[in-house]
Image (cartoon, grey):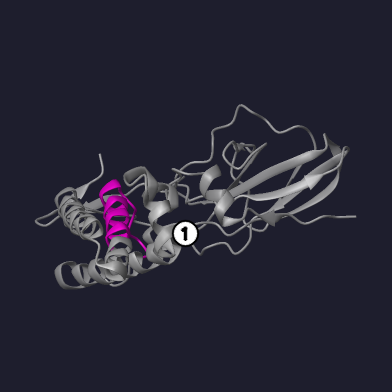
Amino acid sequence: MLTEATSLKADTAEGAIKGVNMALFTDGSISNLEDLRAYESSIFEVASTERIDLSKKLALAQQELETELGALLRQRYERQGLGDVVVTRPLRQWHVFQTLALAYRDAYNSHLNDRYLGKWKEYLKLAQWAWGKLLESGIGIAQSPIPKAALPRVIAGVGSLAGGTYWIRVAWTSAAGEEGCPSDPANLAVPDGSSLVVEAVNPPGNATGWNVYVGPSAGETRRQNGEPMAPGASWQLADPPSTDGDPAGEGQAASYFLTQRRVLQRG
């Protein structure tokens, strides 16, 4: 019987693939729970004690960034939407600090605890600092943005794979050879004597191909194909996956940067 792959649950994925960057602002959450804990080691305990949903705070903070950044792009650069904005380090830091500020604001308003008030003010200042650094370094823009790939369709067929669980990610590529952010990892448990049949779905309009990454865990996937496969084509792994390919990347780099005074070309 053919078995279809399932997606990695969000709480597991954050631990398994933490540090993987979203290439575009619109690809998903700019940062994750582990990013919050990297800056504030006690944030999980505070959230548990004060019943704060950090995932919702991440989403709310990103909405605030979208409003602020979108207004700037419209007013200063006459640009609409954020689909071509690349996530850079200052942008991610801004998101993290804004999320922590929202969390500590809620914690303070629950009990008016001065310790929480200090943290709230601290992260508000850090968010403003990161916003300033973003303006100073420039807003990264992708000339031809490639959206994050959707979860691939994966089924088990007949082959010579050893039984076990395999993790699969795919990423779209452009005519210029750029690669978008890889999909979330799908996983499939198969018996001995199986193969994996993988298909990338919902190609964006500017995609000319796709790459596939397979490995023994969500954080250890390696590229298995040479040249990118064509959209609509399927790919099959009948033998043990290669361990020599490049690891799944972080997505598309900025083509140029919008600064307060001028446009800076990459390189």
Q: Secondary structure at mark 1?
A: loop
Image-based side of 177 in relation to 257, left or right = right
| Quadrant position of residue 77 | bottom left
Main SS of the magenta part reads: helix
Asked if residue 229 is positioned above or below residue 55 in the image, the reply reads above
Going by the image, does 239 lie left or right of 212?
right
User: Where does the magenta region start and end?
Assistant: 83-101
Residue 36 drawn above or below residue 26: above
- The image shows residue 142, relative to residue 37, as above or below, that is below
- Residue located at (12% from left, 54% from top): 262
Q: Nearer the viewer, residue 155 or 258?
A: 155
Looking at this view, name the residue that lies furthest to the top: 244
- Residue 154 placement (x, y as % from top left): 73, 53
Res 22 visible: no
Decide whether residue 193 is among the magenta residues: no
Residue 227 in view (yes/no): yes
Please report the residue visible at 43 percent of the width from the left and 67 percent of the height from the top: 56
Q: Which residue is mark 1?
A: 147
Drawn side of residue 148 relative to residue 157, left or right: left
**Residue 259 placement (x, y as % from top left):** 15, 54
